[in-house]
Image: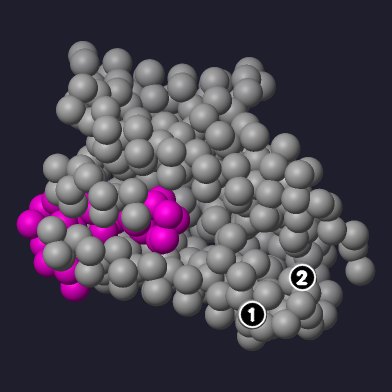
Amino acid sequence: MTTAWIVVAVLFVGTAFMRAVGPVAFGGRSISGRGSAVVGLVAPALLGALVVYETVSAGDRGVALDARLVGLAAALVALALRLPLIAVVLVAAAATALTRLV
Amino acid sequence: MHEHSNVSAGARAGLPLLLPTLALGISFGVLARPVMGPVAPIAMSILVFSGAAQFAALSVLAAGGGAVAAITAGMLLNARWLPMGFAIGPSLRGGPLARAAQGLTIVDASFVIASRGDGSFDRGLLMGATAVQAVAWVSGTVVGVLAGPVLGDPSSLGLDAIFVAFYLALLLEEAHSRRAIAAGLGGAAIAFALMPFTPPGVPIVAASLAALVGLRSNA
């Protein structure tokens, strides 16, 4: 139980630090044209990585191919049908759950 | 300089995230309670407020790992706030403390919503969208902790696929130019290539290098 609280306390400070460094160091500066082109692409680059990570992460290191892949495919279909985000998420969860049942 | 939206416009932009974030919070609460007790998971969601980092730390603790290993796993997934903070910093105003406080509202979905795609960020959208997710994340955790014994294993409900669908939807919204598509695919490829060899979190931070496709002048 104490272990859990140590983890909470350290991650509280560590997370706040990681989020605050950039804004404190670079606040209010203007960036050049090419710099801003790079910065504008950080979001899609990170999202591409997060999709892959959440779909095939084996928890620690390594890759595991499982029912989440079906969830990913179902989410793609739901997005192609222009369903709202909550429906996309529910379709993905349902498809994944059903695959695990089978 | 761009105008910044007000926070309520951000909250409206963040509204579609309410239910998905709630569901993720519930699954965190359900999984965390047997490992961390009833109170620590709720405190963690309020104080740390970083879904991926919390799940990473929890999975280490659940596997019997110690505090240092759990903190390391969490911090590796937190490392992505660093490039995101550097990206968003120039768009924030006020003294260092005010900017640090605004920086604390950086989370994945709000970062994406606030990104104008030209390198600048809308501060009001960032904070408003984060407020919605904070409420959903914390109340979801509370529900999960309380209802955990009734709900059972969240993975049997497919709740782990929520993150997948969530990030995919955000990605497709971002992919409105050839360079954005290239950055997304590049980030995905970097992450996939590194995952078998590096600790969790490293592939995601390294993937932000795919944003360097922005250095190509014409695309």
Q: Position of residue A2 (x, y in %)?
A: 14, 65
Quadrant of residue B173 within the rendered picture: top right
Q: Residue at x 81, y 51 (%)?
A: B6
Left or right, residue B147 beside residue A31: left
| Residue B91: numbered disc | 2
Magenta stretch?
B44-69
Residue drawn at 17 percent across, 68 percent down:
B67
Q: Residues within 10 Å of mark 2 (few under 14, many from 20)?
A: many
Looking at the image, residue B103 lies above or below residue A28: above
Q: Which mark is in front, 2 or 1?
A: 1
Asked whether B107 falls inside the magenta stretch, the response is no
Q: Is tag 2's residue or tag 1's residue first in the polypeptide sequence?
A: 2
Let me know if residue B86 appears in the view: no
Q: What secondary structure is found at the residue carrying circle 2?
A: helix
Name the image quarter holding the N terminus of chain A.
Answer: bottom left
Mark 2 to mark 1: distance in Å? Answer: 15 Å
Q: Which residue is mark 1?
A: B97
Left or right of A22? Residue B5 is right
Give amino acid for label 2: Ser
The numbered mark at residue B214 is none
Q: Are marks 2 and 1 in contact (CB under 8 Å)?
A: no
Q: Chain of mark 2?
A: B
Q: Which SS does the magenta portion mostly show?
A: helix
Instruction: Characterize the local packing of mark 1: few (<14), some (14-19) or many (20 or more) Cα atoms within 10 angstroms.
Output: few
